[in-house]
Image (cartoon, rainbow, N blue to C red):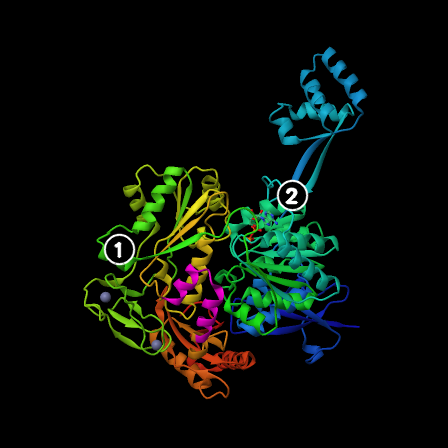
């Protein structure tokens, strides 16, 4: 019987996003996930596509349907499960099916396997000894040399033989003829996780940890596969809990995906995991070569590894029998894709877990408000770990009011308290981390004398500075002129704030000339091993002070760090998005968590212009729920997630007027939709990037389904509407930053 294939045609033309049906020629073996070449369009141009399904019947006139040309060479098959996941992403996040497929495919092409050639011994040790004696008699010293090497090992790498041992190819050939060796070539996997595993210490889980492990495994062994949250303070032993659970899950023949927020954290995590699980662990990320990625993809499929560690794209590892997905530091913003489709890893992980019967564990010291709300609503089972597990206690936290420092004529970037503690630690030979919060620093305007921040009178977010001298709210479009004096205290020192890590290093060198410093930021970590080098150097005690941005606050465990200085806690507090307080709170708590993880008691100094802000107060007391309650109140009163869902519709165009008109059309098309609240189209904060103009519409609803309907309607509208011909429309559900 003739069969038909649904094919997504891979054309880089957004507006056409449909499956096309093709006839499967007699004898051709076609299945979902396969890449094929099909004739496409009027000219029947050979075009690549991905098979998404097979059917027995044809939806069109069968005589007119075209047949698949051929199977694309070197294509790898994606599981139909991953295609289903791509369809879910497309439906809930927007964008085309092709974009969704590209997101779930960490690797799209087959890469030639690496070949390793070895010299293998073919005879017994006794025979080889006889052979060596004979070679020595005949003065064949090269032969004797290699044979002697082979006495102690059965095979040698050919490169080492011709290189280090200076054995010529002619000698090798002669020895093959003598019948003592063979030359064997085989395909090997590239190993992206070379290097040493951490020695495993025998850790006995404490009571709290053990309870979590036991309770989870009780559920698991009963076949229950839900979503779990481990809310544990920094250093409470979450990773040890994960590892104990993983050990049990892989014993049952299942595989595990372990997600980390960014590549920089891979190194430390892999070392720990390798110590415990050996070569059954691998990694997958975008910094690896295509060959390395392909090999890990293949090894996962072939059941050669049990655990894959990586940032969000590792979620799409093609494991056949996935048992568990762990998402460490689940609150991190990097779990949201910034490219279309703008999916959140948490949602997709939960979906994949449901589809494949895998449990999902979210872990954090500062869970996102969404996740805590899900726990409070009973949708997520939550565990708490309240104390540090290993050595070390929670640090003492001091808040330094920068307004007081100015009054006291302290012109340094270091408060008196921080300076005093830095001197103390340098004298004792302990280590210091200085953290500069630069997130969201671009744009907001504050007074250097009193700390006043210019805010929107309607939205409770800070106004953004625009080059033409105006201040603007990016949620409602309110604008005013940049003031010449602070409206609060009259000081003329009101400006957009800015302080870089390089500047901080200069200040350190000036005030502490003998201190050795390391700087970790985007400049110093370029290149493949940039992060590792700096982190290893600091761990080895090659510097006294590590200076960095958010990169240094996450996950690292440095024994000798006993002081953390947070130079300007508020820099992200008044950024132009509703998540500003949440992000700041998380950063402050995570940064504090770096202090006192070892033998030395830790101190943290939080420098701020706003010691009374609930976010700073709660962080200084490490009081998550004080922050949570207060922040949820704000979200509820002002209508932000997680109380409602927020959809940003972004219109992009090359011409200013076309973009403006187009976005207004979009607004007109949905403004009266029942069950949603629609803001007017406004210019984005950065109204033009790379000569592309950007307009944005914010739409709110309690009901996600409604917003998805609105998205579908706008997608269709944008395809058909003449005035949107030259405007592309992107969707961002529950955006992590303001547009
Ligand atoms: P988290 O992931 O919550 O930050 P980790 O699992 O990294 O915590 O643990 C922090 C430190 O405490 C690590 O050095 C770890 O080896 C140690 N640790 C964890 N659990 C125990 C335990 N039960 N006994 C002793 N040390 C522990
Ligand atoms: Zn002022
Ligand atoms: Zn506003």
Mark with earlier residue (1, 2): 2
Viewer-side residue, 654 vs 562:
562
In the rendered image, the vertical position of residue 8 relative to residue 276, given as above or below: below
Q: Is residue 149 visible?
A: yes
User: Secondary structure beneath disc 1?
Assistant: helix
* Quarter of the image where one finds residue 738: bottom left
Kindly identify which numbered label has been placed on residue 202. Answer: 2
Q: Tell me the tag on residue 154.
A: none
Regarding mark 2 in the picture, which secondary structure is present there? loop
- Residue 221, compared with residue 532, is above or below; it is below
Residue 264 vs residue 605: left or right?
right
For the stretch drawn in magenta, what is the main secondary structure?
Answer: helix
Asked if residue 77 is positioned above or below residue 728 in the image, the reply reads: above
The residue labelled by disc 1 is 405
> Is 510 in front, or is 310?
510
Magenta residues? Answer: 613-633
């Amino acid at each position: 019987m003739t069969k038909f294939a649904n094919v997504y045609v891979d054309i880089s033309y957004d507006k056409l996003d449909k499956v096309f049906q093709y006839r499967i020629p007699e004898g051709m073996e076609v299945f979902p996930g396969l890449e094929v070449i099909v004739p496409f369009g009027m000219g029947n141009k050979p075009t690549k596509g991905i098979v998404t399904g097979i059917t027995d019947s044809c939806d069109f006139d069968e005589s007119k349907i075209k047949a698949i040309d051929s199977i694309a060479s070197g294509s790898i098959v994606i599981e139909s499960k991953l295609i289903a996941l791509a369809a879910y992403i497309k439906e809930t996040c927007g964008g085309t099916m092709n974009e969704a497929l590209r997101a779930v495919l960490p690797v799209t092409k087959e890469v030639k396997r690496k070949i390793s050639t070895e010299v293998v011994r073919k005879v017994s040790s006794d025979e080889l000894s006889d052979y060596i004696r004979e070679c020595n008699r005949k003065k064949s010293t090269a032969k004797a040399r290699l044979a002697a090497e082979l006495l102690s090992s059965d095979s040698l790498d050919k490169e080492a033989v011709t290189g280090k041992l200076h054995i010529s190819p002619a000698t090798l050939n002669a020895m093959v003829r003598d019948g003592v060796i063979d030359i064997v070539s085989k395909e090997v996997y590239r190993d992206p996780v070379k290097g040493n595993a951490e020695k495993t210490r025998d850790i006995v889980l404490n009571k709290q940890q053990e309870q979590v492990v036991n309770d989870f495994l009780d559920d698991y062994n009963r076949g229950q596969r839900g979503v779990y949250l481990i809310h544990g303070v920094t250093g409470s032993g979450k990773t040890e809990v994960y590892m104990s659970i993983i050990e049990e899950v892989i014993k049952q023949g299942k595989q595990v995906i372990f997600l980390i927020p960014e590549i920089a954290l891979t190194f430390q995590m892999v070392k720990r995991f390798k110590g415990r699980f050996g070569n059954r662990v691998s990694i997958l990320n975008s910094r690896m070569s295509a060959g390395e990625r392909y090999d890990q993809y293949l090894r996962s499929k072939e059941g050669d590894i049990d655990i894959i560690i990586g940032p969000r794209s590792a979620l799409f590892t093609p494991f056949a029998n996935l048992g568990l997905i762990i998402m460490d530091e689940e609150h991190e913003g990097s779990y949201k894709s910034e490219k279309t489709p703008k999916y959140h890893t948490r949602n997709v992980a939960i979906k994949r877990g449901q589809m494949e019967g895998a449990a999902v564990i979210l872990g954090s010291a500062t869970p996102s408000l969404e996740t805590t709300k899900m726990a409070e609503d009973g949708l997520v089972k939550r565990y708490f770990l309240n104390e540090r597990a290993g050595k070390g206690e929670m640090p003492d936290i001091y808040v330094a009011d920068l307004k007081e420092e100015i009054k006291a004529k302290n012109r340094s970037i270091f408060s008196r308290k921080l300076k005093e503690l830095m001197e103390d630690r340098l004298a004792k030979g302990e280590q210091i981390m200085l953290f500069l919060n630069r997130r969201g620093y671009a744009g907001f305007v504050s007074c250097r004398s009193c700390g006043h921040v210019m805010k929107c009178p309607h939205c409770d977010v800070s106004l953004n500075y625009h080059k033409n001298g105006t201040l603007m709210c990016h949620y409602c479009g309110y604008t005013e002129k940049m003031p010449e004096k602070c409206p609060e205290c009259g000081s003329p020192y009101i400006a957009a704030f800015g302080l870089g890590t390089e500047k901080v290093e200069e200040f350190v060198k000036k005030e502490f000339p003998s201190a050795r410093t390391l700087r970790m930021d985007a400049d110093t970590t370029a290149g493949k091993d940039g992060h590792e080098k700096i982190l290893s150097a600091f761990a080895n005690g090659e510097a006294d002070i590590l200076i960095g941005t958010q990169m240094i606050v996450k996950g690292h465990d440095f024994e000798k760090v006993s002081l953390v200085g947070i130079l300007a806690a508020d820099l992200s507090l008044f950024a132009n998005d509703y998540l500003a307080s949440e992000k700041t709170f998380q950063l402050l708590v995570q940064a504090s968590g770096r202090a006192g993880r070892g033998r030395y008691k830790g101190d943290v100094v939080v420098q701020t212009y706003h010691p009374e802000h609930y976010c700073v107060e709660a962080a200084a007391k490490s009081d998550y729920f004080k922050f949570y309650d207060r922040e949820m109140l704000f979200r509820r009163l002002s209508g932000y997630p997680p109380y409602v869902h927020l959809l940003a519709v972004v219109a992009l165009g090359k011409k200013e007027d076309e973009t403006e008109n187009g976005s207004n059309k979009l607004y007109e098309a949905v403004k009266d939709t029942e069950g949603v609240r629609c803001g007017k189209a406004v210019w984005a904060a950065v109204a033009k990037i790379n000569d592309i103009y950007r307009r944005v519409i914010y739409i709110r609803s309690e009901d996600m389904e409604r917003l998805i309907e609105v998205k579908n309607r706008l997608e269709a509208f944008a395809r058909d509407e003449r005035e949107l011909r030259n405007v592309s429309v992107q969707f961002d559900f529950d955006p992590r930053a303001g547009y």
